[in-house]
Amino acid sequence: MTESTPDTLLAAVTAEAGLKCTQIVRGTGKSMLVAGEMDGEPVIAKILLTTDPFWVARWRHEIDIYRSFARERPPVRIPELKWMNGQTALILEWIGDRPADEGRYLSCPLDAGDITAVVAAAEAISSWQPAVPGSPARRVMVDYKRRIDRYHRRGFFTAADREALLRLLARYGDRREFAHGDLLPANILLGAGHACTVVDWEFGGQYLAGYDLATLYVLLGDAAPAIRPRIEAAVASAGMDAEFTVNLACILVRELRIHQELSDNDIARGRLPGLLEAWAQGRRRLHACAG
């Protein structure tokens, strides 16, 4: 991919798609979101800015996912794909609802209706499997053994942790289910009547059962503690405590790694004590589950 400026990329999309840009909603080094109109309808354009191979691959995967959703829609509210160029841009139906939060972690409580809607959305996603062979939604997104070994080498998992995780992992072989894979508060839009829309599917694919629920447990649970009993009930009802426990361990350790790599003056480092305590609890759960 050749290097281009954000203005050049935006100009190309507006010309190719007939997009009338009204506002740049958000811009980062990776991408930008642009609100506008196309064919008289409000839309949101997502434009890739980086040439980093990892994000290029994720971006193309998300385009593939949205294209597949046009053929087979999962039982959860998602924006409709309006246009894409296959490489650097896609244009989606505008959903005017608010994100659960702008950041990686929820900062304010959710009411009971929104908690119900968010957990129900995660369960609905996991209940769906595409029927079309070769669907991008059937791609396996995590090599769990490789991830466990990497975190063990870096000292996050002890030898006993690793052994317990691999013992649980062995119970499930290649069994996986569909998940969003990145269910951050910013990717959950909440609207009137507890409507819940899920956006940003660049990590959508196959995971151990309970991946999205484990993500919600970690990223939303401190600000909205009432969500955790709902998640525990969903996990127990589905009989997936072991898979959920593996996902929870991997997600907690990932969050620890992310926060330990922040600069000392980054306010987000204030979450570290809570994450360390959460992982201590997660470790106890892991070893009890692995028995």
Image: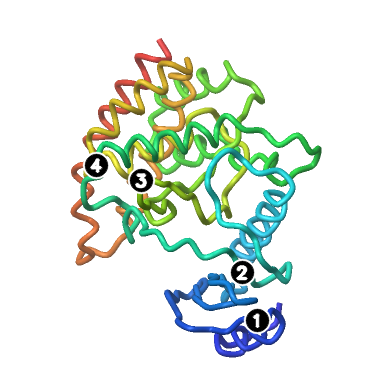
Q: CA distance from mark 3 to mark 1?
A: 34 Å
Q: Give the residue at mark 2.
A: 91
User: Which residue is more in the foreground, 149 or 56?
Assistant: 56
What distance separates the C-alpha of mark 4 from that of mark 2? Answer: 31 Å
Q: Residue at x 43, y 16 (%)?
A: 237
Image-quadrant location for residue 247: top left
Give me the disc on residue 111.
Answer: 4
Q: The residue under label 2 is which amino acid type? A: Ile
Q: CA distance from mark 1 to mark 2?
A: 9 Å
Query: Decide: marks 2, 3 in contact (CB < 8 A)?
Result: no
Q: Which residue is mark 1?
A: 13
At 70% from the left and 52% from the top, the residue drawn is 70
Frontmost residue, 170 versus 224: 224
- Which tag is nearer the camera, tag 3 or tag 4? 3
Residue 111 vertical placement versus 89 (above, below): above
| Mark closest to the chain's N terminus, 3 or 4 | 4
Graded by Cα atoms within 10 Å as few (under 14), some (14 to 19) or many (20 or more), the crowding at tag 1 reads many
In primary-sequence order, the first of circles 1 and 2 is 1
Question: x and y percent of residue 287 in the render?
Answer: 36, 18
The local crowd at label 4, few if under 14, some if 14 to 19, many if 20 or more residues have their Cα within 10 Å, is few
Q: Is residue 250 positioned above or below 271 on the image?
A: above
Q: What's under tag 3, amino acid-wise?
A: Gly
Q: Is residue 100 left or right of residue 135?
A: left
Helix, strand or loop for disc 1: helix
Question: What's the residue type where badge 4 is placed?
Answer: Asp
Numbered badge on residue 193: 3
**As drawn, 212 above or below 269:** above
